[in-house]
Amino acid sequence: MKIGQDLLVLFFEPPKGLEELIVDPACPRTGPAVLLFADSIDLDLWAKEPLEPQKALWTEVAVGYGCEVRGEPATAFHYPHLMLSSAKSDRGVAVADVEMTRFHAACPGYNGGAPGRRCAATARTFGGRPIVDLDITLEQPETQAPDGLLRWVNRIRYPDVTAPDRDIDRGLWFVPAIDPQIADLWTGVGSASFSEGMGWSGVVQGEAWAFGMVYSLEAGEAL
């Protein structure tokens, strides 16, 4: 599957309560916490149905952390802290309502990033509870994304709807972006406010990144 995304990312040192929530002992934390918002499109599906682009769109919010896979940096985003909206979510069930506000190439009058430009994103549960709000300010362009940001480790584990006290656990999976092409890469500073829908409340600050990317994705490899 070929994917296009506009991404907003915040790196920060996680407070203890948030760290305990997002880190899986099977995949130790070796780097900062990572908050990621993505505005996404399935380019293969869009090419098949060009008159119905909304069928190929989804948004996502994920909270994870830096880790290592086979001695190289990676980023862990474990369920249920990897939340997708629309039919692209697992089992076709939308689990988060995500809105991003930023200028990108699909916007009329877009003229690229600029120092001082603000970008923002927000996520709510479909019950309306706030999950997290992100606000960043761009400072300068860059040429390369942070090491490990595009190599993902997922703990795929869902509640068993037939037995509320049990999970369906498929273990750890390695899912790297294949041949990523990055454009309009900027760094800056930002802050995020986590709320009740996340399971931890508080405000964090850190280094922010904003960029567009096209890449391919294949079935993950079990670790």
Image (tube, rainbow, N blue to C red):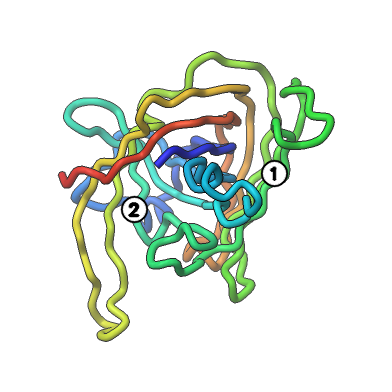
Give the crowd class for mark 2: few <14, some 14-19, many >=20 residues within 10 Å.
many
Residue drawn 57% across the image and 50% down it: 49
Residue 26: image location, x then y, percent = 19, 50
Residue 184 tag number? none
Dot 2 falls on a residue whose secondary structure is loop
In this figure, which residue is indicated by the disc labeled 1?
Answer: 120
Q: Amino acid at mark 2?
A: His
Residue drawn 38% across the image and 41% down it: 65
> Which is nearer the N-term, disc 2 or disc 1?
2
Q: Amino acid at mark 1?
A: Ala
Residue drawn 72% across the image and 44% down it: 101
Does residue 36 appear anywhere in the picture? no
Q: In the rendered image, which quarter is residue 159 located in?
A: bottom left
Taking the image as shown, residue 184 lies to the left or right of residue 167, namely: right
Q: Nearer the viewer, residue 45 or 187?
A: 45
In this figure, which residue is indicated by the disc labeled 2?
Answer: 78
Q: Nearer the viewer, residue 182 or 32?
A: 182
* Quadrant position of the C terminus in the picture: top left
Dot 1 falls on a residue whose secondary structure is strand
Q: Nearer the viewer, residue 203 or 85?
A: 85
Instruction: Answer whether labels 2 and 1 touch (C-beta < 8 Å).
Output: no
Residue 120: image location, x then y, percent = 69, 44
Residue 200: image location, x then y, percent = 49, 61
Residue 25: image location, x then y, percent = 21, 51
